[in-house]
Amino acid sequence: MALLTKTEREINDQPEKFERVVKEYGNISDGMLSFLKDIEKTVSEVDFVGCGSSYYLSMGLSFHFNRLSKGKIISKYFSGSEVAFGLRNFPKNAVLIGISRSGESSETVLALKKAKEKFNVKTCAITCNSNSELVNIADVSANLDFVNEESVVMTQSFTSMAFLGTLIIQNIFDQNNLKNYMQFVPDASKKLLDNAKNLFEKVKPENYDHFVFLGYDEYFAAAMEGVIKVSETSLTPAETYQTLEYRHGPKSKVSDKTLAVVLSNEFMKSEEEKMAKEIKQLGGSVIGISKTGFDVDGNLIVPVGDFSDWFLRVIPLQIIGVRKSLKKGLLPDEPKNLTKVVKL
Ligand code: F1P
């Protein structure tokens, strides 16, 4: 049995990290929750900002915030550079939440500084490093110091910060469901991790040279994170679209070396299934991640399709990247041209 890479170990440890997030949730989140108390009366918008994986994490959290707030408070998402270098303005009483594994990415740190100084924005941080510049700048932070990745590639840091952020959003808008959600996520992640590994022994991702991840809203953000994972670990072409957008041009690239993963939601499932079948007719292979399954090459069944499992759906995409990387003889722990933190 070959020695596991750091990235593989960190992927495998995600359910255990989620259990730890649940166990320590009270201490980790109380500062931010009291800071965000009564936001419906005092806050105009709650926005998220990050770079790289943490940008797609911000995107997913923002979609989920809008879904659960039901329009009471709007949320936007930004990459660090959009805010840091003056493309974005903020209204009065806005809150900006910086997302960063390291807490040291220059653009994210600059973004919070700029928003604070220029627009008097209130700032929070969600990070895996409480001893970081981002935490120093933010008015308040929620820190996961027990998530301590050695790999450059963000895997458990992405999903653990996404879980924490989603819990905080649920805590604000849907407190009655919080307890069930806390039980659901670690258990669902264990099953999804095992089912993905079993499925990939049959539908082997390493046999494909072109990956397409399709979904809407939070699932689109998860799919974008999948593109980053596959790109940085395996240097293989990967792309993401809203599921039905794939018809409008991008499907021209489908071949028998294409593996598509459809991260389906329960609201559009029948339409998404038609798209999946169309990709098969064009010669591609398709895996569905859904609550009720598709008639395609393989399925990963998850208990919900209401977007609350959005970050869990990144886990199979992480595994695809590593399997392809190892097959190509690459080093998933040290992706080409990448450093762990981008300092300008
Ligand atoms: C952001 C990031 C990572 C990426 C690489 C470079 O880091 O873009 O997503 O994997 O490590 O930095 P952070 O702000 O979340 O620490």
Image: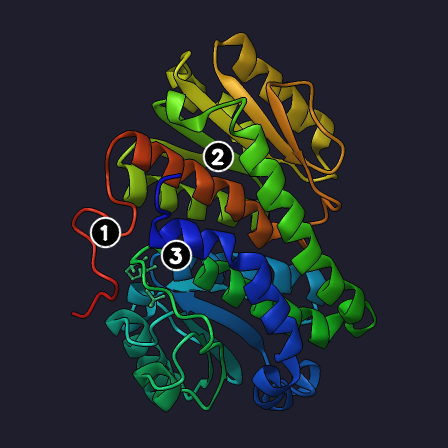
Disc on the earlier residue, 2 or 1: 2
Question: Does the rendering let one see residue 70?
Answer: no
Q: Nearer the viewer, residue 93 or 127?
A: 127
Report the Cα–Cα distance between label 3 and label 1.
16 Å
Q: Which residue is mark 3?
A: 53
Look at the picture and state if 340 lies above or below 26: above
Disc on the earlier residue, 3 or 2: 3
Is 110 on the left-hand or right-hand side of 337? right
- Residue 213 shows which numbered tag? 2
Q: Is mark 3 within 8 Å of ligand 1?
A: yes
Q: Which residue is mark 1?
A: 334
Disc 3 crowd, CA 10 A, few/some/many (<14, 14-19, 20+): many
Disc on the earlier residue, 3 or 1: 3
Nearer to us: label 3 or label 1: 1
Identify the amino acid type marked 2.
Phe
Q: What residue do we see at 70% from left, 69% from top?
A: 170
Nearer to us: label 2 or label 1: 1
Where residue 230 appears, as percent x and y from the top left, is 36, 40
Where residue 15 appears, as percent x and y from the top left, is 59, 58
Identify the amino acid type marked 3.
Ser
Q: Are marks 3 and 1 in contact (CB under 8 Å)?
A: no
Q: What residue do we see at 37% from left, 65% from top?
A: 149
Where residue 304 appears, as percent x and y from the top left, is 74, 46
Q: Is mark 1 within 8 Å of ligand 1?
A: no
Question: Does the rendering let one see residue 180?
Answer: yes
